[in-house]
Image (tube, coloured by chain):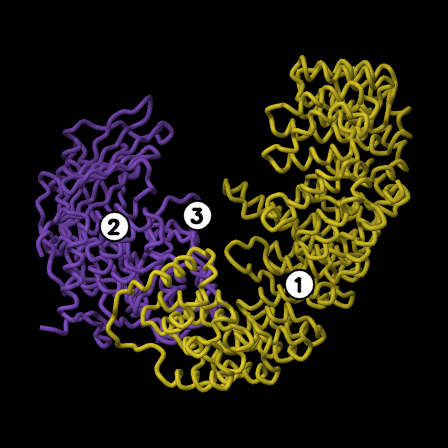
Chain colours: A purple, B yellow
């Protein structure tokens, strides 16, 4: 399978690929060249390459905040951090790390809070019990990060998404953390430009092991929804796949209509923090797979979010029934792509309400009847897909191929070229053949795809 | 080829005996089919014409209905549906797809069977008792749409174990008249909420037995997520559902139908149902005690609407006004103490007070009691109280106005101001307190003097002689601004030369608003309209007076036609859309006197904007009597494509013609008979403006509508037309 990329790198490839798909025409100010992404707007900018990231913010007027002046470099090097025990949110995804910044006073026994305007970066090892070297900054392969500005009291609070780490949510695990300082430069009369950069070394005294607690107990159904959340665009350590979505839908189907909807409402409540943002979109997709309109011929409305499957030119009765997604032989796919959008996106509670008022549970939950690669291929070859506008087809093709491969990542040959972002036609054909040869099928007991042929 | 019905039935049973879709089959990529079929499929996807020879492919399409690929199957079904009865040979295979696990394929199958029509009826009837619930639901739906289902079948299907089947039965029962109402009422209690929603929808369209439906819909209001649908259904019964009003308020809020809905369904329903039954006045009182200020506002508004029939709730309204005010003041104190930017909706709580106190007037019609309540509340609130239009003051008689004398003389500033504002609103009836108003107008308090002058202005020209000297002296003392002088002169029609001089000087004022108000006053009062019109036009040409405002001032000023027509003709070429719009409109108002403008107006009939075309056609009709261009524009506007964007503009244009609109009244009447009540306001306004016999009889018919929104608005229009100074016979 020449020309294929290593599945060991599928995460980062998918990240860049899906990010490109999702950013698409949405961010006009973005520039993407190979493995480089730049985003700017609203007084902030972000630049990312696999080797380095830089985040810049401009704070126009800090006069009213009454911060103390920035001390000399030497003082900054002697900064102390007193870490507190990390906390997790109810879904066990979001880890909050708090601490107190201080400097030693003239009399060495006394500590004074940091009361100047100070940007900070939290480094956290990606894997528990590992000790990445941060003397020359962080490496994105072994470290995750969060940025913030310290309060005038010197208190800091940073948030990390543990789904970007290798955290086992069922146990307490020690993680190395450290703090790096952002660079500050004067901006105008009383403003400051703050630059956070991944190559900034961590303050040696700040590097410690902190115990990240196990996730709070939640129902199995909520856990499955949480695992599927972000499908299919989220770029995490473990990319949520169609398999996660199938599992969540199956579990909810078993609960019956009322309990399934109550569980989805609970998820919406637990994920209401802004941090979850597009994660809540999973509710739209679950509702589509779980319910059908009680009146034959009615359609579930398409959610008004920054996502489109552009079938506007189609006859009314030939529009994509589950727009913007599709269910092929029991396997879900997102056919639509991200777009720019103004205003507030539709809240998923509207679709929960739709299901309660107009929906009835499908007779059975989706049960895959073929392998995902063939299923994706049948969408790609379908007349309706071919009738989509060119941009939608281009976006959809890469996205569908990636979604299919993510579902069977352990079962097909690893990719060879780690930095390519596309699965070209030859690679795709090779995967189709391989999936057929391996006899990949759904194992309903294990709720996963398995290989049946030797 | 057409199979006889029994053959179809046998075929259906044989086909259905085999599983619809194999769950464990080898997947295959959609196959490229023959060119003719692919061409048909492309046409179906894009909604294009199939071509004349499409029916020749029925057999091939029939076999494709069985295709494993869902898209091929869907396209075959959709293509067959487009062939209508010519697709009859495919009936059996299509019926088989009613059992498909995919709902969109089942939907396509139902559409195809409905399109086939009569030939599909017999096989579908056999399937009503089939073991698969989706087949039962699909066949029942197809038969309902074909109106070929027996009431007995619907009754039985309404008790089917599967909710899909019961929902379809509900839909079918909406077409069978009075017989269907009782089973639908029972379905409101269905354990599956979505079936209850379908039953409520069905009772919204099948209103043949209100005595059975309305009590059951009222019972359904408190059921979570069903109440909104029950409220929508009750709204369709209009005034017949008046006993639902207390439950609607007690169940508020009920939510909206979808994310795009704005007004709560309870509020929406109340607009169509109108006043509650007199027996239920006290049942509305608990609504006044709800924590939610919106529920209290709703209850108070409902009591207001009842008028004196709600008298029993008078004391409760007074209490609610007082307690809401206390709540408002407490919130204000808390906000002041905590320096909180978010005053917890205190504004709405003050609105509760205003609406409750307004309702006290409407239910009691006791001016003294109302005025006492006002005094008490204004003193407690330490601010004046104002009402939303129409205000209670507008309903005050001359006698009622006398009740305000005490408040005008009150030591408290806010009480005095509230009373004076009331007298301004009372219009000519405030003349009963003219002496007192003149006294206040002459007094030292500038703010109250101004309010008194405004109240005197609203009394009408009778007060002109006494007000003029006060006006002059206040203006010369610098205590009354020029625009207030202009307004008063206009209202009182004061024609004294010294005011003419002041107003003409005002035309030179740098403030456009002042110029505009002076010009309006001069238009009414000047003994030399031609000269004044020229002055105003010069102002627009030379001193940058707003051209659009000038066009509006000149509109209908018959005495100024000679100067106005050339100026307005010139403005028809103005680059600003609205200046052009208003100039075209104003030219029409001069009728034949604007004949010289026809050459400028005719090219506007080809303007890219339909609004401009409509206005130009209207003006040409008024000037030349040629109805052709306007008729053509109206016809184009009321087509399916044109109506959404320009509907209201077209209705407004007809209304602007006043009696001359008689020639086009048919458009309005036709629309009124088919429109939703929420859209009828502009239609009724147009009929009121036209005021001819045809318009009156359409309004009379509308005033008998069960919908309160329609009937109350139409009744008000009729009152206006029939009033002694109304439009009838003008």
Mark 2 lies on residue: A18
Name which residue lies at 13% across and 41% down: A51
Comparing marks 2 and 1, which lies closer to the viewer? 2
Query: Which residue is at a point 36% across and 64% down the rendered structure image?
Result: A286
Q: Secondary structure at mark 1?
A: helix
Based on the displayed image, in which of its 4 quarters is residue A374 positioned? bottom left
Q: Using the image, name the chain to which the residue with label 1 belongs.
A: B
Q: How many marks?
A: 3
Circle 1 residue: B235
Query: Is the residue marked by circle 2 packed among few (<14), some (14-19), or many (20+) residues within 10 Å?
Result: many
Whether marks 3 and 1 lie on the same chain: no
**Which residue is located at x 69 percent, y 25 percent?**
B600
Q: Is residue B480 visible?
A: no
Between B482 and B58, the one lying in front of the other is B58
Q: Is the same chain shared between marks 2 and 1? A: no
Q: Are marks 3 and 1 in contact (CB under 8 Å)?
A: no
Residue A22, position in %: x, y?
30, 48
Residue A63 vs residue B576, the one in the foreground: B576
**Which mark is drawn over residue A418?**
none
Q: Quadrant of residue A47?
A: top left
Where does label 3 land, which residue? A344
Q: CA distance from mark 2 to mark 1?
A: 49 Å
Taking the image as shown, residue B16 lies to the left or right of residue B226, namely left
> How many other residues sit within 10 Å of disc 1, few (<14), some (14-19) or many (≥20)?
many
As helix, strand or loop, the secondary structure at mark 3 comes to loop
Quadrant into which the C terminus of chain B falls: top right
């Amino acid at each position: 399978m020449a020309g294929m990329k290593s599945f060991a790198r599928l995460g980062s490839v998918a990240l860049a690929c899906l990010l490109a798909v999702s950013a698409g025409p949405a961010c006009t100010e973005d520039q993407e060249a190979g493995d480089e992404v730049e985003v700017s707007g609203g007084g902030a900018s972000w630049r990312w390459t696999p080797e380095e990231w830089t985040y810049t913010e401009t704070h126009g007027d800090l006069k009213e905040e009454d911060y103390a002046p920035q001390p000399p470099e030497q003082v900054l090097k002697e900064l102390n951090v007193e870490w507190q025990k990390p906390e997790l949110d109810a879904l066990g995804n979001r880890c909050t790390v708090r601490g107190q910044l201080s400097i030693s006073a003239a009399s060495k026994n006394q500590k004074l809070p940091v009361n100047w305007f100070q940007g900070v970066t939290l480094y956290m090892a990606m894997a528990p019990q590992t000790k990445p070297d941060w003397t020359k900054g962080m490496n994105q392969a072994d470290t995750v990060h969060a940025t913030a500005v310290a309060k005038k009291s010197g208190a800091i609070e940073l948030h990390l998404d543990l789904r970007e780490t290798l955290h086992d949510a069922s146990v307490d695990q020690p993680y190395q953390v450290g703090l790096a300082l952002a660079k500050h430069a004067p901006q105008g009369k009383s403003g400051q430009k703050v630059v956070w950069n991944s190559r900034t070394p961590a303050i040696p005294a700040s590097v410690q092991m902190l115990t990240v607690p196990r996730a709070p107990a939640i129902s199995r159904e909520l856990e499955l929804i949480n695992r599927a959340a972000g499908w299919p665009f989220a770029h995490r350590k473990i990319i949520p796949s169609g398999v996660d979505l199938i599992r969540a839908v199956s579990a909810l189907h078993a609960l019956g209509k009322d309990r399934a909807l109550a569980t989805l409402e609970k998820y919406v409540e637990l994920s209401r923090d802004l941090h979850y943002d597009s994660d809540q979109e999973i509710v739209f997709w679950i509702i589509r797979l779980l319910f059908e309109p009680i009146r034959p011929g009615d359609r579930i409305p398409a959610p008004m979010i920054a996502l489109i499957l552009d079938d506007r030119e189609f006859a009314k009765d030939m529009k994509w029934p589950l727009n913007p997604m599709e269910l092929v032989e029991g396997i879900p796919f997102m056919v639509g792509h991200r777009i720019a959008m103004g205003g507030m996106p539709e809240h998923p509670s509207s679709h929960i309400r739709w299901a309660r008022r107009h929906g009835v549970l499908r007779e059975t939950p989706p049960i895959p009847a073929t392998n995902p690669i063939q299923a994706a291929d049948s969408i790609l070859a379908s007349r309706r897909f071919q009738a989509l506008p060119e941009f939608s087809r281009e976006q959809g093709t890469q996205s569908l191929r990636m979604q299919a491969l993510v579902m069977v990542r352990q079962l097909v040959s690893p990719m060879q070229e780690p930095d390519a972002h596309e699965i070209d036609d030859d690679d795709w054909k090779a995967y189709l053949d391989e999936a057929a040869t391996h006899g990949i099928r759904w194992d309903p007991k294990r709720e996963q795809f398995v290989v049946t042929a030797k | 080829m057409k199979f006889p019905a029994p053959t179809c039935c046998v075929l259906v049973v044989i086909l259905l005996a085999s599983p619809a879709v194999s769950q464990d089959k080898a997947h295959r990529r959609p196959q490229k089919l023959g060119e003719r079929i692919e061409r048909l499929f492309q046409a179906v996807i894009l909604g294009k014409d199939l071509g004349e020879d499409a029916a020749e492919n029925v057999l091939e399409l029939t076999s494709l209905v069985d295709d494993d690929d869902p898209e091929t199957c869907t396209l075959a079904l959709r293509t067959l549906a487009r062939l209508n009865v010519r697709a009859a040979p495919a009936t059996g295979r299509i019926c088989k797809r009613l059992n498909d696990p995919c709902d969109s394929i089942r939907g396509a199958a139902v559409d195809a069977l409905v399109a086939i029509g009569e030939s599909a009826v017999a096989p579908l009837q056999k399937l009503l008792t089939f073991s698969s619930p989706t087949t039962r639901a699909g066949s029942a739906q197809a038969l309902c749409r074909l109106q070929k289902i027996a009431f007995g079948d619907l009754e039985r299907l309404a008790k089917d174990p599967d909710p899909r089947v019961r929902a379809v039965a509900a839909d079918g029962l909406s077409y069978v008249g009075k017989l269907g109402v009782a089973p639908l009422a029972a379905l409101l209690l269905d354990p599956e909420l979505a079936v209850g929603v379908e039953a409520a929808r069905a009772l919204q369209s099948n209103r043949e037995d209100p005595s059975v439906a309305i009590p059951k819909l009222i019972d359904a209001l408190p059921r979570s997520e069903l109440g909104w649908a029950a409220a929508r259904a009750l709204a369709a019964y209009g005034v017949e559902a008046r006993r639902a009003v207390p439950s609607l308020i007690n169940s508020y809020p009920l939510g909206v139908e979808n994310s795009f809905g704005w007004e709560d369904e309870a509020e929406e329903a109340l607009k169509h149902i109108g006043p509650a039954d007199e027996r239920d006045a006290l049942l509305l009182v608990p609504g006044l005690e709800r924590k939610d200020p919106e529920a209290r506002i709703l209850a108070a508004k409902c009591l207001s609407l009842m008028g004196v029939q709600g008298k029993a709730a008078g004391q409760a309204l007074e209490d609610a006004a007082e307690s809401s005010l206390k709540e408002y003041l407490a919130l204000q104190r808390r906000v002041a103490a905590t320096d909180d930017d978010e005053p917890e909706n205190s504004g709405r709580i003050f609105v509760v007070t205003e609406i409750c106190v307004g309702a006290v007037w409407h239910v009691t019609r006791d001016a003294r009691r109302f005025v006492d309540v006002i005094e008490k509340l204004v003193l407690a609130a330490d601010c004046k109280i104002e009402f939303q239009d129409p205000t209670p003051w507008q309903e005050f008689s001359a006698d009622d106005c006398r009740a305000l004398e005490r408040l005008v003389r009150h030591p408290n500033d806010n009480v005095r101001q509230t009373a004076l504002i009331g007298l301004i609103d009372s219009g000519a009836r405030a003349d009963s307190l003219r002496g007192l108003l003149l006294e206040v107008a002459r007094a030292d308090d500038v703010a109250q003097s101004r309010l008194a002058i405004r109240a005197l202005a609203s009394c009408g020209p009778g007060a002109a002689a006494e007000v003029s000297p006060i006006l002059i002296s206040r203006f010369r003392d610098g205590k009354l601004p020029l625009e207030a002088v202009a307004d008063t002169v206009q209202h009182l029609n004061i024609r004294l030369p010294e005011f003419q001089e002041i107003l003409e000087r005002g035309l030179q004022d740098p403030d456009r608003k002042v110029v505009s108000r002076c010009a309006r006053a001069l238009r009414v009062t000047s003994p030399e309209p031609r000269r004044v019109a020229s002055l105003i036009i010069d102002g627009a040409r030379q001193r940058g007076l707003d051209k659009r405002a000038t066009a509006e001032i000149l509109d209908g000023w018959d005495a100024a036609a000679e100067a106005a027509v050339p100026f307005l003709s010139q403005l028809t070429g103005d680059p600003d859309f609205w200046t052009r719009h208003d100039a075209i409109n104003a030219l029409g108002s001069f009728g034949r006197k604007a004949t010289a403008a026809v050459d400028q107006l005719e090219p506007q009939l080809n303007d890219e904007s339909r609004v401009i075309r409509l206005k130009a056609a209207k003006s040409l009709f008024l000037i030349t009597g040629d109805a052709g261009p306007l008729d053509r524009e109206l016809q184009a506007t009321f087509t399916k494509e044109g109506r959404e964007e320009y509907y209201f503009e077209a209705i407004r244009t007809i209304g602007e013609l006043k009696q001359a609109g008689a020639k086009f009244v048919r458009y309005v009447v036709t629309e009124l008979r088919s429109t939703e009540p929420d859209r009828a306001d502009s239609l009724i306004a147009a009929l009121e403006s036209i005021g001819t016999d045809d318009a009156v009889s359409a309004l009379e018919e509308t005033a008998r509508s069960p919908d309160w929104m329609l009937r109350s608005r139409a009744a008000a229009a009729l009152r206006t037309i029939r009033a002694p100074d109304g439009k009838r016979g003008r």
